[in-house]
């Protein structure tokens, strides 16, 4: 992946959790190139192993201890191997990790990993760096060379969260909401495009709350930023994730209507259909308000596809509350969804509350997922016979096959020559299963 012949040391990075961790992992690799590292996909060959961890749900910490334990034979073979625990578990657990697992050399939080090169040059002692101040984090050499997904690239524009939903650890692990300045984002977008990106997915924990400083000293909204990025000629597509319903401003809805590069797909988590539960979650909107946002959005962009996140068995959730969640699925008809059993996170307000029995949680999750799959499959099947525009990203599983995504972020396979990688083609859909579509070039 990286080709500096002088690079003789190998770094293996394993990412857990959200897309932002994937982005961060790539940036860590880039920041280590000047120290003589190159990325490897084989942990056995590594001189440095970084576990970039996620704390969002159950057993995250235990998983990391067992991951580190698993590295023991590699460490025995290579006593110089360094092990770093980065990301949200490092931030949440702190020094306890090194106390319990002395094989770990360095702990860095999600806002401190830019200090890795410095920490590694003083590498004979243990380091714990968990500052939550983002200053300097987005400043690194070799930007973009570590990207694993070239055609569709992630670009972090906003980090952290001030919303404090009562179930969520993100405000504690990622810190306060912070938006990168417009000029910095635009520069990085140009670099990504020069490196081959044709789609950019803007990342943020609350990406639609973006309010970065523009050159005009004004605070730019996400819509302003999208319009600016759409001026980059070789960039075909723009998306963003994850949005909060309370930040769906009108200028963003207008952008969905008027900006041809902004794709008609929005991931807008609702978590629960019950107003009582939404309140207990501190989501600050009702089911009706969510439905209204989607209906407004559809008045601007009728073909927009909506995906969502759900939590079942939140403390206090009754059967009636759960029925409301099923109802919202029927009302909206999500194109794709992620659903989870509520998982108590240490230090969050909901963790103190009385739990819903695990058996009931499991039963509700199955019911919800069955319904979500039914709707998802119906959407997938309704694509058959229609033509969509697919940006091809890479080769598919079989010889002669390419895979990419259509406007609605559905995965589409087709038999095409490799030259189509990085290009958009019109595909007539011939076949559909729950997660993928198969089409022919028109
Ligand atoms: N910022 C986004 C979500 C970030 S976390 C938003 O506001 O919606 C990604 C998803 O993980 C959440 O949408 C939620 O569905 C799930 N999640 C977060 N904390 C959880 C917990 N304690 N238990 C179960 N699921 C959780
Ligand atoms: Fe977590 Fe999202 Fe709520 Fe922020 S808005 S606390 S990231 S669920
Ligand atoms: Fe996980 Fe941290 Fe992302 S907890 S979901 S890696 S912000």
Image (cartoon, rainbow, N blue to C red):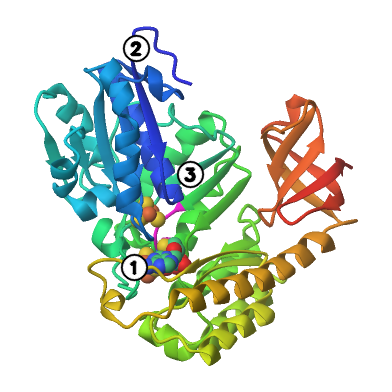
Give the residue at mark 3: 154
Q: Which quarter is ligand 2 in?
A: bottom left
The yes-or-no answer for disc 1 within 8 Å of ligand 2 is: yes
User: Can you say whether 359 is above or below 48 in the image?
Assistant: below
Element assignment for label 3: strand
Across and down, in percent, residue 77 comes to 29, 16
Give the residue displayed 86% in from the left and 51% down from the top: 431
User: Can you say whether 129 is above or below 142 in the image?
Assistant: below
Question: Residue 344 vs residue 23: left or right?
Answer: left
Q: How many marks?
A: 3
Across and down, in percent, residue 259 comes to 62, 58
Q: Earlier in the sequence, mark 3 or mark 2?
A: 2
Give the residue at mark 2: 7
The residue lying furthest to the front in this view is 359
Closest to the camera, between mark 3 and mark 2, is: 2
User: Can you say whether 312 is above or below 96 in the image?
Assistant: below
Give the residue displayed 25% in from the left and 30% down from the top: 83
Report the Cα–Cα distance between label 1 and label 2. 40 Å
Across and down, in percent, residue 53 comes to 34, 46
């Amino acid at each position: 992946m990286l080709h500096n012949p002088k690079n003789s040391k190998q770094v293996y990075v394993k990412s857990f959790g959200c897309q932002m961790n994937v982005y961060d992992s790539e940036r860590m690799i880039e920041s280590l190139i000047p120290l003589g590292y190159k990325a490897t996909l084989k942990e056995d060959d590594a001189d440095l192993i970084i576990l970039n961890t996620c704390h969002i749900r159950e057993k995250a910490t235990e998983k990391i201890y067992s991951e580190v334990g698993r590295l023991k034979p590699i460490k025995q073979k290579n006593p110089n191997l360094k092990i770093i625990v980065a990301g949200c578990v490092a931030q949440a657990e702190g020094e306890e990790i090194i106390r319990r697992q002395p094989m770990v050399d360095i702990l860095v939080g999600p806002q401190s990993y830019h200090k890795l090169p410095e920490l590694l040059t003083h590498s004979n002692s243990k380091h714990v760096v968990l500052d939550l101040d983002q200053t300097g984090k987005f400043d690194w050499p070799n930007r973009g060379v570590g990207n694993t997904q070239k055609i569709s690239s992630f670009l972090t524009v906003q980090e952290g969260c001030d919303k404090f939903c009562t179930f969520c650890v993100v405000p504690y692990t990622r810190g306060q909401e912070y938006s990168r300045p417009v000029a910095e984002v635009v520069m990085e977008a140009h670099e990504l495009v020069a490196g081959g990106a044709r789609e950019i997915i803007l990342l943020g924990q609350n990406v639609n709350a973006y309010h970065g400083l523009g050159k005009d000293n004004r605070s730019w909204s996400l819509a302003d930023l999208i319009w600016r990025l759409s001026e980059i000629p070789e960039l075909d597509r723009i998306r963003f994730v994850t949005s909060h319903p309370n930040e769906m401003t009108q200028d963003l809805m207008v952008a969905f209507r008027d900006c041809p590069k902004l794709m008609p797909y929005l991931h807008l988590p609702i978590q629960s259909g019950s107003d009582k539960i939404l309140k207990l979650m501190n989501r600050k909107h009702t089911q009706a308000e969510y439905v209204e946002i989607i209906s407004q959005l559809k008045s601007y962009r009728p073909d927009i596809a909506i995906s969502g996140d759900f939590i079942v068995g939140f403390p206090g959730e009754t059967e009636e509350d759960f029925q409301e969640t099923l109802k919202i699925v029927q009302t909206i008809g999500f194109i794709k969804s992620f659903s989870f059993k509520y998982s108590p996170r240490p230090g969050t307000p909901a963790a103190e509350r009385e739990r819903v029995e695990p058996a009931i949680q499991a039963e509700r999750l199955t019911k919800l997922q069955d319904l979500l799959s039914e709707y998802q499959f119906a959407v997938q099947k309704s694509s058959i016979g229609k033509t969509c525009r697919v940006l091809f990203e890479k080769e598919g599983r079989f010889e002669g096959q390419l895979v990419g995504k259509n406007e609605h972020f559905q995965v589409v396979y087709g038999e095409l020559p490799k030259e189509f990688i990085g290009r958009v083609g019109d595909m007539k859909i011939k076949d559909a299963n729950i997660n993928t579509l198969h089409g022919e070039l028109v």
